[in-house]
Image (tube, grey):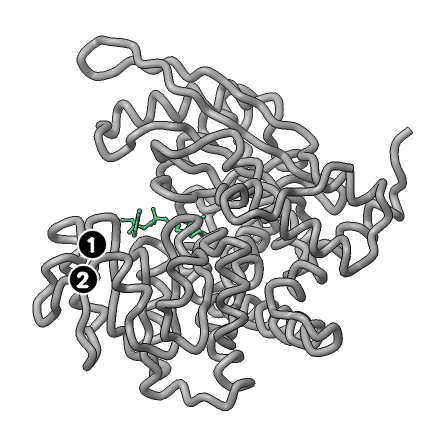
Amino acid sequence: MAQSDTSDVKIAGPLETALVQLDQTAELLQLEQSIHGKLREPKRVVRVSVPTKMDDGDVEVFVGYRSQHNMDRGPCKGGIRYHPGVTMEEVMALSMWMTWKCAVVNVPFGGGKGGIACNPKGMSMAELERMTRRFASELVDIIGPDIDIPAPDVYTNAQTMAWIMDTYSMNAGHVVPAVVTGKPVELGGSLGRDKATGLGCVFVVREALKTLGMPIEGARMAVQGFGNVGSWYSRLIEPIGGKVVAASDSRGGVYNPNGIACADLVAHKKETGSVVGCAGTDGITNEELLAVDCEVLVPSALEGVITSETAPTIKAKVIAEGANGPTTPRGQEALNDKGIFVLPDILANAGGVTVSYFEWVQSLAGYFWSEEEVDTQLEKVMVTAFERVHAESEKLGVDMRLAASAVGVGRVARAVRLRGIYP
Ligand code: NAD
Protein backbone atom coordinates (compact mmCIF):
# COMPACT_ATOMS: atom_id res chain seq x y z
CA MET A 1 0.00 0.00 0.00
CA ALA A 2 1.15 3.53 -0.79
CA GLN A 3 2.47 5.20 2.33
CA SER A 4 2.52 8.97 2.77
CA ASP A 5 5.55 10.89 1.64
CA THR A 6 7.13 12.31 4.76
CA SER A 7 9.12 15.08 3.07
CA ASP A 8 8.58 18.44 4.76
CA VAL A 9 6.87 20.07 1.79
CA LYS A 10 4.46 17.32 0.94
CA ILE A 11 2.99 16.94 4.40
CA ALA A 12 1.76 20.49 4.78
CA GLY A 13 -1.91 19.76 3.99
CA PRO A 14 -4.32 18.32 6.57
CA LEU A 15 -4.97 15.11 4.62
CA GLU A 16 -1.28 14.34 4.29
CA THR A 17 -0.86 15.17 7.99
CA ALA A 18 -3.71 12.82 8.95
CA LEU A 19 -2.33 10.01 6.76
CA VAL A 20 1.22 10.38 8.12
CA GLN A 21 -0.19 10.16 11.65
CA LEU A 22 -2.23 7.07 10.78
CA ASP A 23 0.75 5.40 9.07
CA GLN A 24 2.95 6.05 12.12
CA THR A 25 0.27 4.62 14.39
CA ALA A 26 -0.28 1.57 12.18
CA GLU A 27 3.44 0.85 12.33
CA LEU A 28 3.48 1.24 16.11
CA LEU A 29 0.46 -1.07 16.52
CA GLN A 30 1.69 -3.41 13.77
CA LEU A 31 -1.76 -3.21 12.20
CA GLU A 32 -2.53 -5.80 9.58
CA GLN A 33 -2.48 -4.40 6.03
CA SER A 34 -6.20 -5.02 5.45
CA ILE A 35 -7.29 -2.88 8.40
CA HIS A 36 -4.66 -0.19 7.82
CA GLY A 37 -5.78 0.06 4.19
CA LYS A 38 -9.45 0.30 5.14
CA LEU A 39 -8.77 3.05 7.68
CA ARG A 40 -6.76 5.14 5.18
CA GLU A 41 -9.89 5.64 3.03
CA PRO A 42 -13.12 7.36 4.04
CA LYS A 43 -16.17 5.12 3.68
CA ARG A 44 -17.97 7.74 1.58
CA VAL A 45 -17.34 11.31 0.43
CA VAL A 46 -19.98 13.39 -1.33
CA ARG A 47 -19.49 16.64 -3.22
CA VAL A 48 -22.66 18.62 -3.91
CA SER A 49 -23.50 21.83 -5.65
CA VAL A 50 -25.40 24.29 -3.47
CA PRO A 51 -27.15 26.87 -5.69
CA THR A 52 -28.28 29.70 -3.45
CA LYS A 53 -30.52 32.68 -4.18
CA MET A 54 -28.68 35.77 -2.95
CA ASP A 55 -30.45 38.85 -1.64
CA ASP A 56 -29.80 40.77 -4.87
CA GLY A 57 -31.66 38.13 -6.89
CA ASP A 58 -28.54 36.46 -8.34
CA VAL A 59 -27.91 32.76 -7.82
CA GLU A 60 -24.49 31.83 -6.47
CA VAL A 61 -23.40 28.20 -6.79
CA PHE A 62 -21.38 27.05 -3.79
CA VAL A 63 -19.69 23.66 -3.44
CA GLY A 64 -20.31 21.57 -0.32
CA TYR A 65 -18.81 18.33 0.96
CA ARG A 66 -19.52 15.63 3.51
CA SER A 67 -16.95 12.98 4.32
CA GLN A 68 -17.96 9.91 6.31
CA HIS A 69 -14.76 8.24 7.34
CA ASN A 70 -15.83 5.24 9.38
CA MET A 71 -18.98 3.65 10.81
CA ASP A 72 -17.57 0.54 12.48
CA ARG A 73 -18.28 1.76 16.03
CA GLY A 74 -21.48 3.70 15.27
CA PRO A 75 -22.92 6.44 13.05
CA CYS A 76 -20.63 9.21 11.79
CA LYS A 77 -20.34 12.33 13.87
CA GLY A 78 -18.72 15.64 13.05
CA GLY A 79 -19.04 19.31 12.33
CA ILE A 80 -20.02 21.40 9.36
CA ARG A 81 -17.69 24.26 8.48
CA TYR A 82 -18.34 27.38 6.42
CA HIS A 83 -15.03 28.85 5.27
CA PRO A 84 -13.43 29.93 1.98
CA GLY A 85 -10.66 27.34 2.52
CA VAL A 86 -12.95 24.28 2.74
CA THR A 87 -11.87 21.52 0.31
CA MET A 88 -12.65 17.85 -0.13
CA GLU A 89 -9.20 16.93 1.20
CA GLU A 90 -9.73 19.06 4.29
CA VAL A 91 -13.05 17.46 5.24
CA MET A 92 -11.59 13.99 4.55
CA ALA A 93 -8.77 14.71 7.00
CA LEU A 94 -11.10 16.19 9.59
CA SER A 95 -13.46 13.21 9.33
CA MET A 96 -10.56 10.81 9.92
CA TRP A 97 -9.51 12.72 13.05
CA MET A 98 -13.12 12.58 14.23
CA THR A 99 -13.04 8.78 14.01
CA TRP A 100 -10.01 8.57 16.29
CA LYS A 101 -11.37 11.27 18.61
CA CYS A 102 -14.68 9.46 19.17
CA ALA A 103 -12.70 6.32 19.97
CA VAL A 104 -10.31 8.13 22.37
CA VAL A 105 -13.25 9.26 24.50
CA ASN A 106 -14.98 5.94 23.79
CA VAL A 107 -18.28 7.30 22.45
CA PRO A 108 -20.08 5.01 19.96
CA PHE A 109 -19.53 7.07 16.82
CA GLY A 110 -17.30 7.11 13.78
CA GLY A 111 -15.97 10.26 12.17
CA GLY A 112 -17.67 12.61 9.74
CA LYS A 113 -17.04 16.18 8.64
CA GLY A 114 -18.50 18.53 6.09
CA GLY A 115 -18.46 22.05 4.90
CA ILE A 116 -19.14 24.59 2.22
CA ALA A 117 -16.47 26.69 0.53
CA CYS A 118 -17.95 30.15 1.06
CA ASN A 119 -17.33 33.41 2.88
CA PRO A 120 -20.05 33.42 5.56
CA LYS A 121 -18.92 36.79 6.93
CA GLY A 122 -20.02 38.42 3.68
CA MET A 123 -23.46 36.77 3.65
CA SER A 124 -26.76 37.86 5.22
CA MET A 125 -28.69 35.61 7.62
CA ALA A 126 -31.28 34.98 4.90
CA GLU A 127 -28.57 33.91 2.43
CA LEU A 128 -26.96 31.66 5.05
CA GLU A 129 -30.34 30.07 5.78
CA ARG A 130 -31.09 29.37 2.10
CA MET A 131 -27.58 27.96 1.54
CA THR A 132 -27.80 25.77 4.66
CA ARG A 133 -31.27 24.43 3.78
CA ARG A 134 -30.21 23.59 0.21
CA PHE A 135 -27.05 21.86 1.49
CA ALA A 136 -29.11 19.89 4.05
CA SER A 137 -31.56 18.87 1.29
CA GLU A 138 -28.68 17.54 -0.79
CA LEU A 139 -27.46 15.48 2.19
CA VAL A 140 -30.87 14.27 3.36
CA ASP A 141 -30.34 10.66 2.22
CA ILE A 142 -26.96 10.24 3.85
CA ILE A 143 -27.46 11.94 7.21
CA GLY A 144 -29.76 10.91 10.07
CA PRO A 145 -29.64 9.85 13.74
CA ASP A 146 -28.44 6.34 12.78
CA ILE A 147 -26.22 7.37 9.86
CA ASP A 148 -24.41 10.65 10.32
CA ILE A 149 -25.08 13.46 12.80
CA PRO A 150 -23.69 16.93 11.95
CA ALA A 151 -22.70 19.57 14.53
CA PRO A 152 -21.35 23.14 14.44
CA ASP A 153 -17.75 23.89 13.47
CA VAL A 154 -15.91 26.98 12.20
CA TYR A 155 -18.40 29.77 11.38
CA THR A 156 -21.50 27.63 11.95
CA ASN A 157 -23.55 27.60 15.16
CA ALA A 158 -26.75 26.48 16.91
CA GLN A 159 -28.89 28.40 14.40
CA THR A 160 -27.24 26.54 11.50
CA MET A 161 -28.09 23.26 13.24
CA ALA A 162 -31.70 24.40 13.76
CA TRP A 163 -32.06 24.97 9.97
CA ILE A 164 -30.57 21.57 9.19
CA MET A 165 -32.84 19.87 11.75
CA ASP A 166 -35.90 21.63 10.35
CA THR A 167 -35.05 20.83 6.72
CA TYR A 168 -34.42 17.17 7.55
CA SER A 169 -37.61 16.97 9.65
CA MET A 170 -39.76 18.53 6.90
CA ASN A 171 -38.43 15.91 4.49
CA ALA A 172 -39.06 13.09 6.98
CA GLY A 173 -42.56 14.30 7.79
CA HIS A 174 -41.93 14.32 11.53
CA VAL A 175 -39.58 16.02 13.94
CA VAL A 176 -36.11 14.41 14.15
CA PRO A 177 -34.10 16.25 16.84
CA ALA A 178 -31.32 13.63 16.95
CA VAL A 179 -30.21 14.38 13.36
CA VAL A 180 -27.90 17.15 14.63
CA THR A 181 -26.20 18.14 17.86
CA GLY A 182 -25.21 21.60 19.02
CA LYS A 183 -28.76 22.72 18.29
CA PRO A 184 -30.57 25.33 20.43
CA VAL A 185 -31.70 24.07 23.84
CA GLU A 186 -35.28 25.05 22.91
CA LEU A 187 -35.17 22.41 20.15
CA GLY A 188 -33.72 19.62 22.28
CA GLY A 189 -30.11 20.77 22.45
CA SER A 190 -28.13 19.82 25.53
CA LEU A 191 -27.41 22.19 28.34
CA GLY A 192 -23.64 22.67 28.49
CA ARG A 193 -22.98 21.85 24.80
CA ASP A 194 -21.95 25.39 23.90
CA LYS A 195 -19.08 25.46 26.38
CA ALA A 196 -18.26 21.73 26.21
CA THR A 197 -15.16 21.82 23.98
CA GLY A 198 -13.58 24.61 26.03
CA LEU A 199 -14.51 22.93 29.32
CA GLY A 200 -13.17 19.55 28.17
CA CYS A 201 -9.92 21.27 27.23
CA VAL A 202 -9.75 22.89 30.68
CA PHE A 203 -10.12 19.45 32.33
CA VAL A 204 -7.23 17.91 30.35
CA VAL A 205 -4.98 20.95 30.85
CA ARG A 206 -5.67 20.75 34.59
CA GLU A 207 -4.78 17.04 34.60
CA ALA A 208 -1.64 17.61 32.49
CA LEU A 209 -0.33 20.38 34.76
CA LYS A 210 -0.99 18.16 37.78
CA THR A 211 0.90 15.30 36.13
CA LEU A 212 3.82 17.57 35.19
CA GLY A 213 3.95 19.08 38.69
CA MET A 214 3.13 22.57 37.40
CA PRO A 215 0.75 24.75 39.47
CA ILE A 216 -2.35 25.96 37.67
CA GLU A 217 -2.51 29.02 39.89
CA GLY A 218 -1.01 31.83 37.83
CA ALA A 219 -0.21 29.58 34.83
CA ARG A 220 -0.03 31.87 31.79
CA MET A 221 -2.17 30.96 28.76
CA ALA A 222 -1.93 32.14 25.14
CA VAL A 223 -5.09 31.40 23.16
CA GLN A 224 -5.07 31.56 19.36
CA GLY A 225 -8.62 31.87 17.98
CA PHE A 226 -11.11 33.48 20.36
CA GLY A 227 -14.18 31.74 18.94
CA ASN A 228 -16.38 29.10 20.55
CA VAL A 229 -13.52 26.89 21.73
CA GLY A 230 -10.94 29.57 22.59
CA SER A 231 -13.30 31.94 24.37
CA TRP A 232 -14.96 29.25 26.50
CA TYR A 233 -11.56 27.77 27.34
CA SER A 234 -10.36 31.20 28.47
CA ARG A 235 -13.47 31.93 30.51
CA LEU A 236 -13.36 28.55 32.25
CA ILE A 237 -9.61 28.32 32.94
CA GLU A 238 -9.66 31.74 34.66
CA PRO A 239 -11.76 30.70 37.72
CA ILE A 240 -9.39 27.79 38.44
CA GLY A 241 -6.29 29.98 38.40
CA GLY A 242 -5.18 30.21 34.74
CA LYS A 243 -4.12 33.65 33.51
CA VAL A 244 -4.80 34.52 29.86
CA VAL A 245 -1.91 36.73 28.68
CA ALA A 246 -2.62 36.64 24.92
CA ALA A 247 -5.60 36.00 22.66
CA SER A 248 -6.29 36.41 18.96
CA ASP A 249 -8.75 35.99 16.13
CA SER A 250 -8.64 36.33 12.36
CA ARG A 251 -7.99 40.08 12.65
CA GLY A 252 -4.96 39.82 14.97
CA GLY A 253 -4.05 39.41 18.61
CA VAL A 254 -3.68 41.16 21.95
CA TYR A 255 -1.11 40.74 24.72
CA ASN A 256 -0.60 41.75 28.33
CA PRO A 257 2.03 39.83 30.34
CA ASN A 258 0.11 40.61 33.55
CA GLY A 259 -3.07 38.96 32.32
CA ILE A 260 -6.23 40.05 30.48
CA ALA A 261 -9.66 39.74 32.12
CA CYS A 262 -11.66 37.32 29.96
CA ALA A 263 -14.86 39.25 30.58
CA ASP A 264 -13.18 42.27 28.91
CA LEU A 265 -12.11 40.18 25.91
CA VAL A 266 -15.60 38.70 25.52
CA ALA A 267 -17.27 42.12 25.82
CA HIS A 268 -14.84 43.76 23.37
CA LYS A 269 -15.28 40.95 20.85
CA LYS A 270 -19.04 41.19 21.18
CA GLU A 271 -18.97 44.93 20.63
CA THR A 272 -16.39 45.17 17.81
CA GLY A 273 -16.27 41.66 16.32
CA SER A 274 -12.64 41.18 17.36
CA VAL A 275 -10.38 41.01 20.41
CA VAL A 276 -8.05 43.53 18.69
CA GLY A 277 -7.96 46.84 20.54
CA CYS A 278 -9.19 45.46 23.89
CA ALA A 279 -8.35 48.01 26.61
CA GLY A 280 -5.11 47.46 28.53
CA THR A 281 -3.48 45.29 25.87
CA ASP A 282 -0.78 45.62 23.19
CA GLY A 283 -1.42 44.42 19.66
CA ILE A 284 0.42 41.32 18.39
CA THR A 285 0.18 39.20 15.26
CA ASN A 286 -1.02 35.60 15.22
CA GLU A 287 2.58 34.47 14.59
CA GLU A 288 3.81 36.47 17.59
CA LEU A 289 1.08 34.92 19.74
CA LEU A 290 2.55 31.46 19.15
CA ALA A 291 5.88 32.68 20.54
CA VAL A 292 4.51 34.39 23.65
CA ASP A 293 6.22 33.58 26.97
CA CYS A 294 3.65 31.38 28.72
CA GLU A 295 3.03 27.99 30.31
CA VAL A 296 0.18 26.81 28.05
CA LEU A 297 -0.41 27.59 24.37
CA VAL A 298 -3.91 26.83 23.11
CA PRO A 299 -4.19 26.93 19.31
CA SER A 300 -7.95 27.02 18.74
CA ALA A 301 -8.42 28.40 15.23
CA LEU A 302 -7.39 26.48 12.11
CA GLU A 303 -5.06 23.71 10.91
CA GLY A 304 -1.35 23.81 10.13
CA VAL A 305 -0.16 26.73 12.29
CA ILE A 306 2.53 24.85 14.26
CA THR A 307 5.11 23.81 11.67
CA SER A 308 8.85 23.11 11.52
CA GLU A 309 9.21 26.89 11.09
CA THR A 310 6.97 28.15 13.90
CA ALA A 311 7.55 25.37 16.47
CA PRO A 312 11.12 26.46 17.34
CA THR A 313 9.78 29.89 18.40
CA ILE A 314 7.31 28.44 20.93
CA LYS A 315 8.12 29.06 24.60
CA ALA A 316 5.11 27.30 26.17
CA LYS A 317 5.74 24.12 28.21
CA VAL A 318 2.36 22.63 27.30
CA ILE A 319 0.28 22.87 24.12
CA ALA A 320 -3.44 22.05 24.26
CA GLU A 321 -4.88 21.72 20.77
CA GLY A 322 -8.35 23.26 20.89
CA ALA A 323 -8.34 23.30 17.07
CA ASN A 324 -8.24 20.24 14.87
CA GLY A 325 -4.90 19.59 13.18
CA PRO A 326 -3.01 22.74 14.22
CA THR A 327 0.34 20.91 14.21
CA THR A 328 2.04 19.33 11.19
CA PRO A 329 4.12 16.14 11.66
CA ARG A 330 7.36 18.13 11.25
CA GLY A 331 6.00 20.67 13.73
CA GLN A 332 5.42 17.82 16.22
CA GLU A 333 9.01 16.62 15.76
CA ALA A 334 10.27 20.12 16.54
CA LEU A 335 8.03 20.25 19.64
CA ASN A 336 9.39 16.88 20.78
CA ASP A 337 12.96 18.18 20.35
CA LYS A 338 12.05 21.04 22.67
CA GLY A 339 10.41 18.72 25.22
CA ILE A 340 7.02 20.42 24.92
CA PHE A 341 4.13 18.35 26.30
CA VAL A 342 1.33 18.26 23.70
CA LEU A 343 -2.29 17.49 24.44
CA PRO A 344 -3.29 16.50 20.91
CA ASP A 345 -6.53 17.59 19.23
CA ILE A 346 -8.18 14.16 19.38
CA LEU A 347 -7.90 14.36 23.17
CA ALA A 348 -7.84 18.08 23.99
CA ASN A 349 -10.93 19.12 22.03
CA ALA A 350 -12.92 15.90 22.48
CA GLY A 351 -15.22 17.55 25.04
CA GLY A 352 -17.40 18.83 22.20
CA VAL A 353 -18.12 15.44 20.69
CA THR A 354 -18.56 13.95 24.16
CA VAL A 355 -21.39 16.35 25.00
CA SER A 356 -22.72 15.92 21.46
CA TYR A 357 -23.00 12.25 22.35
CA PHE A 358 -24.88 13.20 25.54
CA GLU A 359 -27.14 15.42 23.41
CA TRP A 360 -27.84 12.63 20.91
CA VAL A 361 -28.71 10.27 23.79
CA GLN A 362 -31.04 12.89 25.31
CA SER A 363 -32.67 13.63 21.94
CA LEU A 364 -33.31 9.93 21.27
CA ALA A 365 -34.63 9.34 24.77
CA GLY A 366 -36.61 12.58 25.01
CA TYR A 367 -35.30 12.88 28.56
CA PHE A 368 -33.06 15.79 29.44
CA TRP A 369 -30.19 16.17 31.90
CA SER A 370 -29.27 19.11 34.14
CA GLU A 371 -26.20 21.15 33.19
CA GLU A 372 -24.51 19.90 36.36
CA GLU A 373 -25.06 16.29 35.24
CA VAL A 374 -23.63 17.07 31.78
CA ASP A 375 -20.52 18.77 33.21
CA THR A 376 -19.94 15.99 35.76
CA GLN A 377 -20.20 13.24 33.14
CA LEU A 378 -17.94 15.25 30.79
CA GLU A 379 -15.30 15.58 33.49
CA LYS A 380 -15.33 11.82 34.09
CA VAL A 381 -14.91 11.09 30.37
CA MET A 382 -12.11 13.63 29.86
CA VAL A 383 -10.14 12.62 32.96
CA THR A 384 -10.44 8.93 32.02
CA ALA A 385 -9.31 9.67 28.44
CA PHE A 386 -6.34 11.74 29.67
CA GLU A 387 -5.26 9.00 32.07
CA ARG A 388 -5.62 6.29 29.39
CA VAL A 389 -3.60 8.26 26.82
CA HIS A 390 -0.94 9.25 29.34
CA ALA A 391 -0.57 5.63 30.49
CA GLU A 392 -0.24 4.53 26.84
CA SER A 393 2.40 7.20 26.27
CA GLU A 394 4.43 5.94 29.26
CA LYS A 395 3.96 2.28 28.32
CA LEU A 396 4.98 2.71 24.69
CA GLY A 397 7.53 5.47 25.28
CA VAL A 398 5.92 7.73 22.69
CA ASP A 399 4.60 11.30 22.72
CA MET A 400 1.00 12.02 23.69
CA ARG A 401 -0.10 12.48 20.05
CA LEU A 402 1.05 9.04 19.00
CA ALA A 403 -0.32 7.57 22.23
CA ALA A 404 -3.77 9.13 21.67
CA SER A 405 -3.71 7.92 18.09
CA ALA A 406 -2.75 4.43 19.29
CA VAL A 407 -5.71 4.40 21.70
CA GLY A 408 -8.15 5.69 19.07
CA VAL A 409 -6.93 3.72 16.06
CA GLY A 410 -6.51 0.62 18.24
CA ARG A 411 -10.16 0.72 19.36
CA VAL A 412 -11.42 1.23 15.81
CA ALA A 413 -9.17 -1.55 14.51
CA ARG A 414 -10.57 -3.96 17.12
CA ALA A 415 -14.11 -3.08 15.99
CA VAL A 416 -13.20 -3.70 12.34
CA ARG A 417 -11.59 -7.02 13.24
CA LEU A 418 -14.65 -8.13 15.23
CA ARG A 419 -17.11 -7.13 12.52
CA GLY A 420 -14.99 -8.49 9.65
CA ILE A 421 -15.01 -7.26 6.08
CA TYR A 422 -18.47 -7.56 4.51
CA PRO A 423 -19.41 -9.80 2.74
P1 NAD B 1 -15.42 29.58 15.68
O1 NAD B 1 -15.86 29.96 14.33
O2 NAD B 1 -16.35 29.78 16.83
O3 NAD B 1 -14.07 30.36 16.05
C1 NAD B 1 -12.95 30.37 15.24
C2 NAD B 1 -12.06 31.51 15.72
O4 NAD B 1 -10.82 31.46 15.03
C3 NAD B 1 -12.65 32.89 15.46
O5 NAD B 1 -12.41 33.72 16.57
C4 NAD B 1 -11.84 33.38 14.25
O6 NAD B 1 -11.74 34.79 14.19
C5 NAD B 1 -10.51 32.75 14.53
N1 NAD B 1 -9.67 32.64 13.34
C6 NAD B 1 -10.04 32.34 12.08
N2 NAD B 1 -8.95 32.38 11.27
C7 NAD B 1 -7.90 32.67 12.07
C8 NAD B 1 -6.53 32.82 11.83
N3 NAD B 1 -6.02 32.69 10.61
N4 NAD B 1 -5.73 33.13 12.88
C9 NAD B 1 -6.25 33.25 14.13
N5 NAD B 1 -7.55 33.11 14.42
C10 NAD B 1 -8.36 32.83 13.39
O7 NAD B 1 -14.92 28.07 15.58
P2 NAD B 1 -14.75 27.00 16.73
O8 NAD B 1 -15.96 26.17 16.78
O9 NAD B 1 -14.23 27.66 17.96
O10 NAD B 1 -13.62 26.07 16.10
C11 NAD B 1 -12.23 26.39 16.22
C12 NAD B 1 -11.41 25.12 16.04
O11 NAD B 1 -11.82 24.19 17.03
C13 NAD B 1 -11.59 24.41 14.70
O12 NAD B 1 -10.38 23.78 14.36
C14 NAD B 1 -12.63 23.37 15.01
O13 NAD B 1 -12.59 22.29 14.11
C15 NAD B 1 -12.19 22.98 16.40
N6 NAD B 1 -13.22 22.32 17.21
C16 NAD B 1 -14.41 22.92 17.48
C17 NAD B 1 -15.34 22.26 18.29
C18 NAD B 1 -16.63 22.90 18.70
O14 NAD B 1 -17.35 22.30 19.51
N7 NAD B 1 -16.97 24.09 18.23
C19 NAD B 1 -15.05 20.97 18.76
C20 NAD B 1 -13.84 20.41 18.48
C21 NAD B 1 -12.92 21.09 17.70
* Contact, mark 1 vs mark 2 (Cβ under 8 Å): yes
User: Residue, x 83% and y 45% (percent of image)?
Assistant: 416
Counting residues from the N terminus, which is met first, the one under dot 1 or under dot 2?
1
Query: Is 416 placed left or right of 311 in the picture?
Result: right
User: Residue, x 20% and y 68% (percent of image)?
Assistant: 263
Is the C terminus in the top left, top right, bottom left or bottom right quadrant?
A: top right
Determine which residue is flagged by label 1. 252
SS category of the residue bearing label 2: strand
- The 10 Å Cα crowd at callout 2, few under 14, some 14 to 19, many 20 or more, is some
- The 10 Å Cα crowd at callout 1, few under 14, some 14 to 19, many 20 or more, is many
User: Residue, x 45% and y 28% (percent of image)?
Assistant: 166
In this view, the residue in front, 212 or 374, is 212
Residue 368 visible in this rendered orientation of the protein: no
| Residue 145 horizontal/vertical position (percent) | 62, 37
In this view, the residue in front, 163 or 328, is 328
In this view, the residue in front, 187 or 325, is 325
Is the N terminus in the top left, top right, bottom left or bottom right quadrant?
A: top right
Q: Quadrant of residue 267?
A: bottom left
SS category of the residue bearing label 1: strand
Residue 257 visible in this rendered orientation of the protein: yes
User: Residue, x 62% and y 25% (percent of image)?
Assistant: 142
Above or below, 17 against 179 in this view is below
| Residue 32 horizontal/vertical position (percent) | 86, 48
Determine which residue is flagged by label 2. 284
Residue type, label 1: Gly
| Residue 72 horizontal/vertical position (percent) | 76, 42
Marks 1 and 2, how far apart in space? Answer: 7 Å
In this view, the residue in front, 30 or 51, is 30
